[in-house]
Image (cartoon, rainbow, N blue to C red):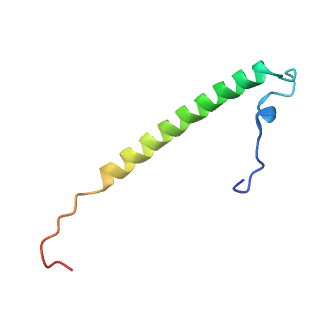
Amino acid sequence: LYGRPCRSPLCWAEVSETLLLGPNLVQETTENIKTIKQHLLTAQCRQKNYVDRRTRPLKFNIGDH
């Protein structure tokens, strides 16, 4: 995916950890998804603030081309 190997939920466990099965896998995956979503929201807010500081409102008059 985008030049990087795709990591499935099974890859999220560390090598030394035991294999997660059943409900534990679902819970661990859900927690990881929540963390990922929070990181995405943080990045989106940072990017929005960057753009908002550098844009200016545009005004158009009738007849402008």
The quarter in which the C terminus is drawn is bottom left
Q: Residue furthest left?
A: 62
| Left or right position of 23 against 51 | right
Residue 44: horizontal and vertical position, in percent?
A: 46, 43
Q: Residue at x 59, y 29 (%)?
A: 34
Q: Position of residue 15 (x, y in %)?
A: 86, 28
- Residue extending furthest front? 22
Residue 35 place in picture, x, y as percent: 60, 29
What is the total number of numbered labels drawn onto the structure image?
Answer: 0
Q: Residue at x 70, y 21 (%)?
A: 27
The answer to which quarter of the image holds residue 20 is top right
Residue sitting at x 72%, y 53%: 1
In-image side of 22 versus 39 (left or right) = right
Quarter assignment of residue 12? top right
Is 11 drawn above or below residue 18 in the view shown? below
* 52 or 36, nearer to the observer: 36
Q: Residue at x 77, y 24 (%)?
A: 25
Viewer-side residue, 23 vs 51: 23
**62 up-or-down from 5: above or below:** below
